[in-house]
Amino acid sequence: MLKELKRKIIFSALLIIFIIAFGTLGYMIVEGWNFLDSLYMTILTLTTVGYREVHDLSSNGTRVMQSYSVRPIYFPAMTSNTSALMETGCT
């Protein structure tokens, strides 16, 4: 039981890291921003805080943000569904 819980926690942590890395790299590639500005914008988008953009977004940057902004909606569902699948052994 404890081993299974540890596996779920590690999987969820890796998923969060992947999603943050994906968004950060997206802003770095599309907008040409540095790492910290890209990470800041990614965290703002994920948490739906939305203080303000670090820099003005290009049209491609706006598309990245729009496609990335749905992740806070489906991320909890995705992790809970994955946990349910892992519990039932349907992985």
Image (tube, grey):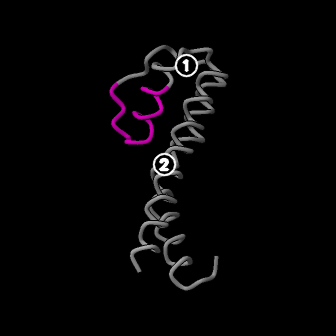
Q: Is residue 33 above or below residue 73?
A: above
> Residue 4 location in percent, x, y?
47, 74
Mark 1 residue type: Leu
Please tell me which residue lies in front, 59 or 23.
23
Marks 1/2: CA–CA distance: 24 Å
Q: In this view, does 9 lie to the left or right of 67?
A: left
Circle 2 residue: 16
The numbered dot on residue 57 is 1
**6 to 13, vertically: above or below:** below
| In this picture, residue 25 sits left or right of residue 69 | right
User: How would you rate the neighbour count of disc 2 (Cα within 10 Å): few for under 14, some for 14-19, many for 20 or more?
Assistant: some
Q: Which of marks 1 and 2 is in front?
A: 2
- Upstream in sequence: badge 1 or badge 2: 2
- Label 1, residues with CA under 10 Å away: few <14, some 14-19, many ≥20: some
Q: Is residue 20 left or right of residue 29?
A: left
Residue 90 shown in magenta: no
Q: Which of 27 and 65 is in front in this view?
A: 27
In the image, farthest residue toward the front: 3
Q: Where is residue 9 in the image (x, y as percent from the top left)?
A: 43, 62
- What amino acid is found at the position of numbered circle 2 in the picture? Ile
Position of the N terminus, as image quadrant, is: bottom left
Above or below for 16 versus 78: above
Q: Is mark 1 on a helix, strand or loop?
A: loop
Report the quarter where the C terminus lies: bottom right
Residue at figure coordinates x 66%, y 22% from the top left: 30
Residue depicted at x 52% and y 51%: 14
Which stretch appears magenta? 39-51
Instruction: Find residue 52 and report its image quarter.
Output: top left
Where 77 sits versus 85, above or below?
A: above
List x then y, in percent, for residue 73.
46, 55
Residue at image point 36% right, 32% down: 50
- Helix, strand or loop at label 2? It is helix
